[in-house]
Image (tube, helix red, strand yellow):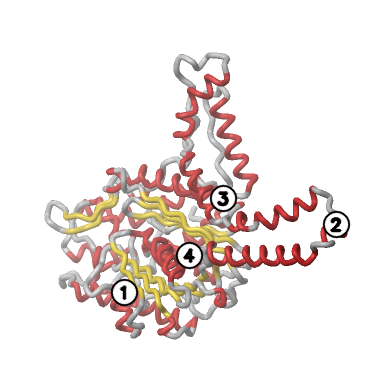
Amino acid sequence: MAIQQELLSTEIVDRGVKSSGPDAGLPSFSVRVRRRLPDFLQSVNLKYVKLGYGYLINHGVYLITGAPFLVLVFGIKAGKMGREELWAPYELTILLFVLVTLVLIGVTYLAVVPRSTYLIDFACYRPPDELKISKHQFMEMAKKSGNFNQESLDFMQRMLKNSGIGEEAYLPEVIASPAKAITLGQGREEAQLVMFGAVDELFAKCRVRHKDIGVLVVNCGIFNPTPSLSAMLINRYKLRSDIQNYSLGGMGCAAGVVAIDLARDLLQAHARTLALVVSTEVITGSWYTGNDQTMLLSNCFFRMGCSALLLSGQRRDRWRAKYELRQVVRTHRGAEQRSFEAVYQREDNSGRRGLHVGREVTEVGGHALKVNITTLGPLVLPLSEQVLFFATLLSGNFVNKQENKPYIPDYKRAFDHICILATGKAVLDELQKNLELTPDYMEASRSTLHRFGNTSSSSIWYELSYLETKGKIKRDDRIWQVAFGSGFKCNSVVWRALKRVRRSPYGPWIDCIDHYPLREES
């Protein structure tokens, strides 16, 4: 059952609602509108479009603060007041009024409008070469472990063959040692290896003082020990005692965006500090040793990885930052029971714990993605795309048409680069088809999947690192990162490049970037 390959195959947009009911044939336009409007609103999810415009309006409050000055200017223009009429005999009074108005506008803007959040830099951990594992080595290890029956082995081999993962992804050493039981201590060792590796590289790139970090957010889905993962980092780097630290657990592959959103909010309250965000997944804690095929998928797709980000809310850091955070849109479908249980950690019939991925994840993931991009659209799409989108919806629902497919906005006009969570080849194929993306937009995701596998919440950062190493990031480029995970969630974050990003001597792609993109297999 290729559950993982079928993920998100649901159409991203619904087809138009066909007319029905006793009033469908009446010539009265008002009756037709009244009858069709409820179904129309439901079919196009206008409440999410409304939410998107709400985001836009809330962040456009500075336009309101400038109203007094605009009224003054346009009032003068409309009244055709000449220079002499305006300035004599009240030139000093009017001058003071204008100056005070401008000062009030500036103060109100600084007080009401949230400060920008800047991504100074980030780092992605590359494990040592001895932890590389090919598909053949993976299957040999699985056979020697004695944990899996022949049906399970055949299933995992099929999954690996069609996964899109190459021969050089990484797994922790303990996985390849079936004679040893996996312990909590070994999970801590893997967590320390990947987290410390990513943070060490980030500190080397940014030359930041540890005492300048006042906010720490760590996310890891399955492995959550005591003391927490954030406490491990505080202990290792001797971070300050008043640091605002959080460990997010159980939130899946979309938790990295949640961590960024939390760090952004904390930076609004703690302005004179920096935020460190660390995203990872500890494979040791999620490895499944049973024969339930819905739980074997995580063994086949997840690999080692970790990312570390340094964020700032201080305007003085803009000059050295790479990116500015533009939008964060989070969609959570957990109120629906099917969505809540689609990805679920539990024990199998033998009492072995694993991550269950249900068949319903296909439909659930498609709906979550549709809601997310519907909300995101008004924030990022150019006006021409929004007009076409609404015009098509209106024409298809208020005019008698048996079949009508709503216009799919061209997200290529909103973004220069797209980083989609590298879950599996079939998932990326479906997303490319439904969003009508060109191969260039999928290059980073496919290359990351092949080289590093699915590294969970850090995957979108390996993809951005790929784009940087390829020299594709230019000033004012817009980057869309989208991830989905248990709950069920679909989260998006949009960045704007503040400078042309030059190739760095650091990074996981340094010695292999020339091998990508891969040639299409025949």
Label 1 CA crowd tier, 10 Å (few <14, some 14–19, many 20+): many
Label 4 CA crowd tier, 10 Å (few <14, some 14–19, many 20+): many
Which of the two marks, 1 or 4, is nearer to us in this view? 1
Residue at numbered disc 2: 85
Which of the two marks, 2 or 1, is nearer to us in this view? 2
**Which of the marked residues, 3 or 4, is nearer the chain's N terminus?**
3
- Tell me the number on the disc at residue 463: 4
Residue at numbered disc 3: 411
427 with respect to 411 (left or right): left
Dot 1 lies on which element?
A: helix
**Which of the marked residues, 2 or 1, is nearer the chain's N terminus?**
2
Residue at the spot 17% in from the left edge and 72% down from the top edge = 183
Check whether the beta carbons of the residues at disc 1 and disc 4 lie within 8 A of each other. Answer: no
Observer able to see residue 60: yes
Towards the viewer: 486 or 269: 269
**Which of the marked residues, 3 or 2, is nearer the chain's N terminus?**
2
Q: Position of residue 148 (x, y in %)?
A: 18, 58
The amino acid marked with disc number 4 is Glu
Towards the viewer: 445 or 179: 445
Dot 3 lies on which element?
A: helix
Which of the two marks, 3 or 2, is nearer to us in this view? 2
Mark pair 3, 1: CA separation: 36 Å
Residue at the spot 30% in from the left edge and 67% down from the top edge = 137
Residue at numbered disc 1: 230
